[in-house]
Image (cartoon, rainbow, N blue to C red):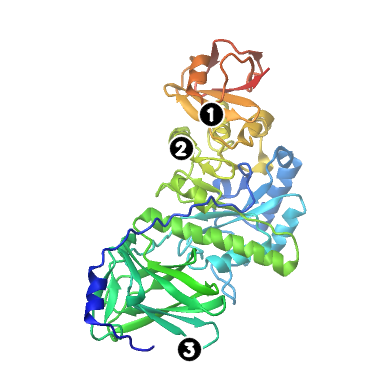
Amino acid sequence: MKRNSMCPICFLKTVFTRPSKVGNVYPSEKYDNGTLTAPPMGWSSWNTFKNNIDEDLIYETAVAVKEKGLLAAGYDRINLDDCWHSSLRDENGELQGDLTRFAGGIGNLVKRINALGLKVGIYSSNGTLTCEDLPASLGNEYRDAYTFAKWGIEFFKYDFCHNVPLPYYAPVVFGVEFTEKGKKEGKFYPCTDARLEGLAKFMPCKKLPTGCFVSGMDKCRGAMEYNNVYSEEGGEYVLTLYCKKTNSPYEKLAMIEINGERYLCHVPPQKFWNLTSRFQVEVRLEKGVNKVRIFNPVSSRADSSMLQYLTMGKALKEATARVAAETGKPEKPIAYSICEWGKNQPWKWGALAGNMWRTTPDIIPRWFWIKMIYEKTVKLYGYASAGAYNDPDMLEVGNGNLTEEQNKSHFALWCMMAAPLILGNDIRKISDKILKIVTNPELIAVDQDKLGKAAKRVVKGSVDVLARPLEDGAAVCLFNKKSGAKKACVSVSKLIKDGYAGLESGAKYVCKEIYSGKSYPLKDSIEVSLVGDACEVILLKKV
């Protein structure tokens, strides 16, 4: 690295130049991996079997899903939740199935289930360990995504246990160096070549070869930008970040944005044995002049969560494309489920990072808890769209001591909210009553409607009224939240005035009650009688 000299007047100009604004770190485009044009339907191992799963149980369930008509109804995914894997990564550092319970290997199990016409999903956590304290994927995103893609996985649930947030402190930088990969000599760009933004500022230090360093880039409040990084040929380069040590016990993070592509550089807590340190990232430069921006993107826990989930989403896309290129077979995209529990408002950024996002903590087969999850999720209807869905967690239909009416309402409400329909009961022992509920073709059609719009609650009370626009009409749900019987009605003019369901004034509609089976012309109001905890879903079609 060649020492850089700078005149005193030029240095003062850099110190007192008014900085510009730091930009937003959120992506501008919706996450798109070519999958989940409708909410996913399938089965997951967790709700019934928790940590007691093995390859025989999973395969038997897959067979039952097909034989009992659930596959024909749309339930086409078998998802392995936590505890499918060993506490040991293999000799290459890759995840592997439990060495005794999944002795045949996950890849082989996937092939057997695929032969039945079903897809397979898998689980990990955005943390150092999973919720059951097994190896997880934080820091191993690209390695684990590649493992899943090699196995033929087509659904991925990414939990939030043992998460370690990204640091919001930034390193103090006095220059960057770009070296073509495989070569020794590169080009050094002093910090004084950079334009500063926000609170970023030059700080004098005579001991540094540049005479100064840049600080003030914590919490996305400041940045440094180079507009003079030149490359004779585009390609892979090693970026070396030159930092002044601060004797700080805190981890630090720098995001390096090059021509719109983003890279993260982690800096561990440092001891002050030397004045400077070097940290490297592999990057890509375009031929000619490149724009390079350095800052810390984390101003909140939500930023940290979003960026970590974005990393895995990118890894999944790259992994499936890589496996397709290596095998010459069609790409199998992996549907991406963000299981962040709603802690950092994932509905605000989930569509940018994945296909679906959990809105609440885990579901349990207790009616009061299911209603709590409904109350939280129904308000978020505006964030759902085709290919991006609020996830109020897996279905508990058929589990616990839920009554028949509670099971029916639970299923209907999830369908109205355009939620994923992931069964969590023992399919091998499913009763005819539960099977009838979860294979109701008209409710499934509501859930899978191509518009992908979740229901809006247009009336809130002891009886809630939900309205949802459909490709060929609308669906209206009246839900009795009380344990006693209720007569309920909603005026058609109110639904028309609200506008969300898309009903037209003066148009004629025919109504069909899904659970009762009644059909009749739409009048001035929709009226139903509901026993405790019951709901009725009415389909409205224009005639």
* Residue at 48% across, 33% down: 367
* Mark 2 or mark 3, earlier in chain: 3
* Residue at 59% across, 25% down: 475
Pick out the residue farthest to the top: 524
* Mark 2 or mark 1, earlier in chain: 2
Q: Position of residue 252 (x, y in %)?
A: 35, 70
Q: Are marks 2 and 1 in contact (CB under 8 Å)?
A: no
Q: Amino acid at mark 2?
A: Leu
The vertical placement of 377 against 238, above or below, is above
* Residue at 26% across, 63% down: 18
Q: Amino acid at mark 1?
A: Gln
Of circles 3 and 1, the one toward us is 3
Of circles 2 and 1, the one toward us is 2
Q: Secondary structure at mark 2?
A: loop
How packed mark 2 is, by other alpha carbons closer than 10 Å (few <14, some 14-19, many 20 or more), is some
Q: Position of residue 267 (x, y in %)?
A: 37, 74
* Mark 3 or mark 1, earlier in chain: 3
Residue, disc 1: 406
The vertical placement of 242 against 325, above or below, is below
The vertical placement of 491 against 309, above or below, is above
How packed mark 3 is, by other alpha carbons closer than 10 Å (few <14, some 14-19, many 20 or more), is few
Of circles 2 and 3, the one toward us is 3
Q: Secondary structure at mark 1?
A: helix
For the N terminus, give its image quadrant: bottom left
Q: Amino acid at mark 3?
A: Glu
For the C terminus, give its image quadrant: top right
Residue, disc 3: 185
Q: CA distance from mark 2 to mark 3?
A: 54 Å
